[in-house]
Image (tube, rainbow, N blue to C red):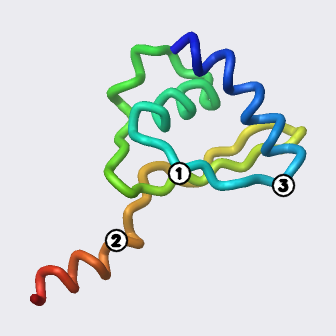
């Protein structure tokens, strides 16, 4: 977690300078980011679901951080239906 605490100000400053940008991360990195942004204790780590290929939408502005979606996987429904039909 110490690495993320040092890294998160850098990520937030990049988001502010560039009007946002996508970050592709694995479930542990995503959870660490969400814990930091939501100001949750480390004990909340396993309470944040992160499925493979999920989308987390986070708005960062000078006013603060707003988490719009967590663990969204609806975009995978078409792939699942296509796979089940074959």
Q: Residues within 10 Å of mark 2 (few under 14, many from 20)?
A: few
Q: Residue at x 53, y 26 (%)?
A: 35
Q: Which residue does the image show at 48% across and 56% down from the upper left?
A: 55
- Identify whether 42 is placed above or below 12: above
Check whether the beta carbons of the residues at disc 2 and disc 3 lie within 8 A of each other. Answer: no
In the displayed structure image, the side of residue 9 where residue 18 appears, left or right: right
Place of residue 17 in the rendered image (x, y in percent of width and height, measured from the top left): 89, 45
Report the front residue among 86 and 68. Answer: 86
Q: Which residue is mark 3?
A: 19
Is residue 8 left or right of 70 when viewed as pictured?
right
Query: Mark 3: few, some, or many residues within 10 Å (few <14, many ≥20)?
Result: few
C-alpha separation, residue under disc 2 versus residue under disc 3: 26 Å
State the SS at label 3: loop
Label 1 crowd (10 A; few <14 / some 14-19 / many >=20): some
Q: Residue at x 60, y 54 (%)?
A: 57
Q: Position of residue 52 (x, y in %)?
A: 33, 52
Q: Of 51 and 66, which appears nearest the observer?
A: 51
- Residue 56, numbered circle: 1
Residue 8: percent from left, percent from top: 68, 26
**Residue 76 got which mark?**
2
């Amino acid at each position: 977690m110490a690495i993320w605490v040092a890294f998160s100000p850098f990520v937030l400053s990049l988001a502010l300078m560039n009007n946002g940008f996508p970050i592709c991360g694995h479930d542990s990195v995503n959870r660490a980011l969400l814990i930091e942004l939501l100001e949750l204790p480390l004990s909340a780590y396993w309470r944040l679901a992160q499925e493979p290929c999920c989308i987390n939408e986070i708005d960062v502005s000078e006013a603060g951080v707003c988490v719009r979606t967590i663990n969204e996987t609806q975009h995978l429904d078409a792939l699942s239906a296509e796979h089940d039909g074959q």
